[in-house]
Amino acid sequence: MKAHCLCNAVRIETGEYREAGACHCGMCRRWGGGPLLAVHCGSAVTITGEEHLRAYRSSDWAERAFCSQCGSHLYYRFLPTGEYIIPAGLFEAGTALDFRSEIFIDHKPAYYDFANNTEKLTEAEVLAQYAPQ
Ligand SMILES: [Zn+2]
Ligand SMILES: [Zn+2]
């Protein structure tokens, strides 16, 4: 699948990953101004125009990248596995996605709700699922 930032300086190519999810955590909402709608794209991702990319180390386990020219958010990267979580809106028009899950649902503020029928996980459920075994 192909994605790019607003100014086209950074282009991303991924495998076929059609499941989109939302993260309602406070960091994602502060980063983007709203919940992060994104696609887990594994670790095999090709980035063109990397010289325009800046990464912010948002925690001990993750970084968040953006385009230094246009400010588009490019990915959240989970460092222990190298997995890229790419904002759904970066993918080219017509990319069919299926909105399946919402995480950190217990951090969602009361002023919005998605009507989609999704699997909803609390922070505790997410940590239990992703904590190193
Ligand atoms: Zn850009
Ligand atoms: Zn989040």
Image: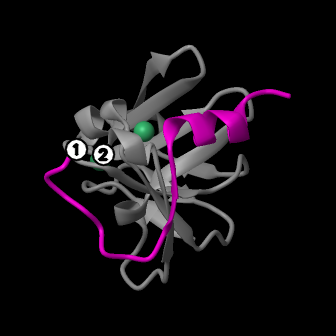
Residue 64 drawn above or below residue 98: above
Helix, strand or loop for disc 1: loop
Q: Amino acid at mark 2?
A: Lys
Quadrant holding the C terminus: top right
**Residue stretch in magenta:** 110-133
Q: Mark 1 highlights which residue?
A: 109
| Left or right: residue 13 compared with residue 74 | right
Q: Mark 2 highlights which residue?
A: 108
Residue 13: percent from the left, percent from the top? 58, 61
User: Which residue is painted at 30% across and 45% down in the image?
Assistant: 108
The reply to whether discs 1 and 2 touch (Cβ–Cβ < 8 Å) is yes
Quadrant holding the N terminus: bottom right
Q: Residue furthest right?
A: 133
Q: Amino acid at mark 1?
A: Pro
How would you rate the neighbour count of disc 1 (Cα within 10 Å): few for under 14, some for 14-19, many for 20 or more? few
Classify mark 2 as within 8 Å of ligand 2 or not, answering yes or no: no
User: Which of 90/79 is in front?
Assistant: 79
